[in-house]
Image (cartoon, rainbow, N blue to C red):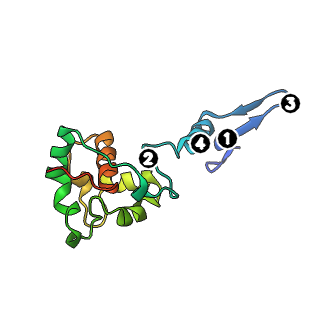
Amino acid sequence: MMSLFSLSAFKPFRSSSDKAYVSPSALIIILALLTGGCGFSDTTPETKLSEMQKVSLTAELQEIYKQSCANCHESSATGAPVTGDTERWQVVYNKPFELTLSRVIDGYGGMPPLGQCFQCSREQLVSLIHYMSRPADRQP
């Protein structure tokens, strides 16, 4: 008799005498764990942002920065890391980049979801984060 709480359906690995089998769900989990570190960041916790090259923005991203990011990231009074303040941004970059990106997407602390850039793609958000976190290459 099979129990409703039987875990036999969830066994990720089965083997017979002549071959091994990995269930598709276990394979997906393994692949997710192996690629979990893959992301958009070119930094590691050991990277010193102050030593990295400045990042410039395209005209489109400059406009997005002015409309969505500058209000909070140009003034230390807001509590947000100021654009170009590599010391404050280093604290952010010492965490996994995917965590930082998820906080941008979902909102964090006083930051609204997507920094109120609802039209921004994931790649645009990554570019904006890199721009703000590097030594400032300020544009008018």
- Tell me the element at label 2: loop
Q: Are marks 4 and 1 in contact (CB under 8 Å)?
A: no
The answer to the question of whether label 1 and label 2 lie on touching residues, with beta carbons closer than 8 A, is no
User: Does residue 71 lie above or below 62 as drawn?
Assistant: below
Question: Which residue shows up at 58% across the image and 38% down it?
Answer: 31
Sequence-first tag of 3 and 1: 1
Q: Extreme bottom residue here?
A: 77
Foreground mark, 1 or 2, reads 2
Q: Is residue 62 left or right of residue 129?
A: left
Give the distance between the C-alpha atoms of the residues marked 4 and 1, in whole angstroms: 17 Å
Apparent side of residue 77 relative to residue 39 in the rendered image (left or right): left
Report whether 50 appears left or right of 8: left
Whole-percent x and y of residue 3? 66, 48
N-term-proximal mark, 2 vs 3: 3
Q: Secondary structure at mark 3?
A: loop
Within 10 Å of disc 1 (Cα), the crowding (few <14, some 14-19, many 20+) is some
Viewer-nearest of labels 4 and 1? 4
Q: Position of residue 60 (x, y in %)?
A: 18, 39
Q: Which residue is mark 1?
A: 12
Q: Amino acid at mark 3?
A: Ser
Measured along the vertical axis of the image, is residue 29 above or below residue 77? Answer: above
